[in-house]
C-alpha cells in the first residue's frame, strides 16, 4: 500500500465492535501495579504510556525503524546527542542547521569534552569532515535556508569511517523523505511542525535503524523526563491521518507561490527546493517525494520585509512552520541564523491558492522594486 494510505490508519488498533477508531488519550501518571510489577504493561507515565505506544507504532511503521516520542523536537534532538556522544567524541554539525541544535552542542556538549565541527549543508560540505567523527548530524532541507545535502552519499562515507548519521527530517517529514531507507542511523523530527500541523502542540520523535539504539534513546527519555503529555500525543496521532492531504495542498501552494514570487521585481531571491532551477533541486528531487512547505524570501532590507509582512492579511506573523495556516517571520529578528536583514521564512498553509496569490500580490505593492 502507498504511504498515503498507510498514514490514515497507522497505529490505529484492529476493529473491535463498538470501540472508537483511535482510543482517546489516557490520563494517568501511575497505573495499577500491585506486587511484582514487572509484568504490568504500564507502571509510571515517565517510563511508558499507552497513548505514546499507539503513536510510536504509527511512527515506526512510517519511518521503517522503531520510534520513540518526545516532549518536543529539541528533546528528541538532545536524546540523540545524549545517547551517542561521549567526552572526546567529534560531531559534525550543519553550519546552517536549526540554531537550537547548534546552541545545544555549543553550550553544553562541548563543555563535556565533545568537539564540534561545522560545515554548510549545501554541496554536502559536511563530508569533508567525517574522518574521526562519531556522529554526523544532517538537516535537509535546512531551516531556514532550505539547502539540501545528499543523505545517501554522506551515509556511505560515514560508514567507511565508522561514524553514525542522524538526519533532522523536520522540514520534509517522513512522508516526503525517508532517512532510514537512505541509510541513516537516526531519523529525528520536531512533530510540532508539519507532522502535527495545527500549531497547537510541541512534540518530537526519534526513529532508529538498529533496535539497540532505541534502548539508549528510551533510557535517556526516562532519566531526563523529556516526556510528552497524552493530549499532545493523541492530537498528533489524530492529525497523522490528514498528513498526506495537508502536504499535498501545502506543497502545491508552496510551488505556486514560489513560482509567482520569483517573477516579482520586489524580491532579491526566492529559495524553494521544488523550483527546477533552485540550487537544491537536483538532490532534493532524488531523495524527496515532495519539496516541503517552506519558502525562503530575500527582500532588499529589513524595511521591505517588514512592509510585506505588515500588509499581508493571510500571512500570520509567527515563528514555527509546517502548519495549516500560512505564517511568516523575518528571521533576523532572532539574530541567530546568519541570514540577511531582509530574509523572510514563509510557511505555506492550506488556504486556496487564488487567495494566497492575491494577498501576496497586494502585500508586494507596499514594497519598492529592487534596482537591477
Ligand atoms: C529543523 C528543526 N529541528 C528541531 C526543532 C526543534 O523543535 P521544537 O520546537 O519542537 O523543540 C526545530 C524548531 O523549529 C526545527 O526547525
Image (cartoon, rainbow, N blue to C red):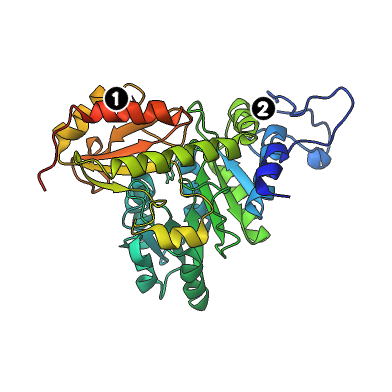
Q: Is residue 294 shown to the viewer in this render?
A: yes
Q: Residues within 10 Å of mark 1 (few under 14, many from 20)?
A: many
Residue at point 34%, 46% (across, down): 144
Q: Is residue 60 above or below residue 17?
A: below
Where is residue 350 drawn, in percent x and y? 48, 30
Counting labels gives: 2
132 left or right of 43 in image = left
Q: Quadrant of residue 4?
A: top right
Q: Residue 267's mark?
A: none
Where is residue 40 drawn, in percent x and y? 81, 37
Q: Residue 312's mark?
A: 1
> Which label lies toward us, 2 or 1?
1
Q: Quadrant of residue 45?
A: top right
Q: Residue 29's mark?
A: 2
Task: Label 1, secondary structure: give it.
Answer: loop
Ligand 1 position by quadrant: top left
Where is residue 250 drawn, in percent x and y? 48, 37
Residue at point 47%, 48% (across, down): 77
Amino acid at each position: 500500500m502507498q504511504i498515503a494510505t498507510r498514514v490514515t490508519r497507522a497505529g490505529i488498533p484492529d476493529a473491535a465492535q463498538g470501540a472508537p477508531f483511535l482510543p482517546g488519550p489516557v490520563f494517568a501518571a501511575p497505573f495499577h501495579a500491585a506486587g511484582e510489577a514487572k509484568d504490568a504493561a504500564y507502571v509510571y507515565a515517565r517510563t511508558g504510556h499507552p497513548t505514546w505506544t499507539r503513536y510510536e507504532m504509527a511512527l515506526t511503521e512510517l519511518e521503517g525503524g522503531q520510534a520513540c516520542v518526545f516532549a518536543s523536537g529539541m528533546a528528541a534532538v538532545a536524546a540523540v546527542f545524549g545517547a551517542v556522544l561521549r567526552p572526546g567524541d567529534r560531531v559534525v554539525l550543519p553550519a546552517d542547521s536549526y540554531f537550537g541544535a547548534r546552541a545545544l552542542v555549543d553550550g553544553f556538549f562541548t563543555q563535556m569534552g565533545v568537539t564540534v565541527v561545522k560545515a554548510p549543508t549545501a554541496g554536502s560540505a559536511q563530508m569533508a569532515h567525517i574522518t574521526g567523527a562519531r556522529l554526523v548530524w544532517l538537516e535537509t532541507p535546512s531551516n531556514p535556508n532550505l539547502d539540501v545535502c545528499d543523505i545517501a552519499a554522506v551515509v556511505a562515507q560515514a560508514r567507511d569511517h565508522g561514524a553514525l548519521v542522524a538526519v533532522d527530517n523536520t522540514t520534509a517529514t517522513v512522508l516526503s523523505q525517508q532517512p532510514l531507507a537512505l541509510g541513516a542511523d537516526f531519523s529525528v523530527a520536531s512533530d510540532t511542525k508539519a507532522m502535527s500541523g495545527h500549531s497547537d502542540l510541541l512534540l518530537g520523535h526519534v526513529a532508529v535503524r538498529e533496535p539497540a539504539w532505541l534502548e539508549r534513546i528510551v533510557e535517556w527519555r526516562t532519566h531526563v523526563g523529556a516526556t510528552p503529555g497524552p493530549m499532545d500525543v493523541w492530537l498528533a496521532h489524530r492529525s497523522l491521518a490528514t498528513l498526506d492531504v495537508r502536504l499535498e495542498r501545502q506543497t502545491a501552494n508552496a510551488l505556486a507561490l514560489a513560482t509567482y514570487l520569483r517573477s516579482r521585481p520586489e524580491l532579491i531571491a526566492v529559495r524553494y527546493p521544488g523550483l527546477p532551477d533552485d540550487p537544491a533541486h537536483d538532490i532534493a528531487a532524488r531523495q524527496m517525494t515532495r519539496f516541503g512547505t517552506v519558502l525562503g524570501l530575500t527582500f532588499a532590507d529589513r524595511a521591505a520585509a517588514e512592509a510585506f509582512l505588515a500588509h499581508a492579511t493571510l500571512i500570520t506573523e509567527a515563528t514555527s512552520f509546517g502548519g495549516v495556516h500560512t505564517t511568516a517571520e523575518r528571521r533576523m529578528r532572532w539574530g541567530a541564523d546568519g541570514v540577511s536583514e531582509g530574509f523572510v521564512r514563509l510557511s505555506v498553509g492550506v488556504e486556496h491558492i487564488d487567495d494566497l496569490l492575491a494577498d501576496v500580490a497586494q502585500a508586494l505593492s507596499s514594497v519598492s522594486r529592487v534596482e537591477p
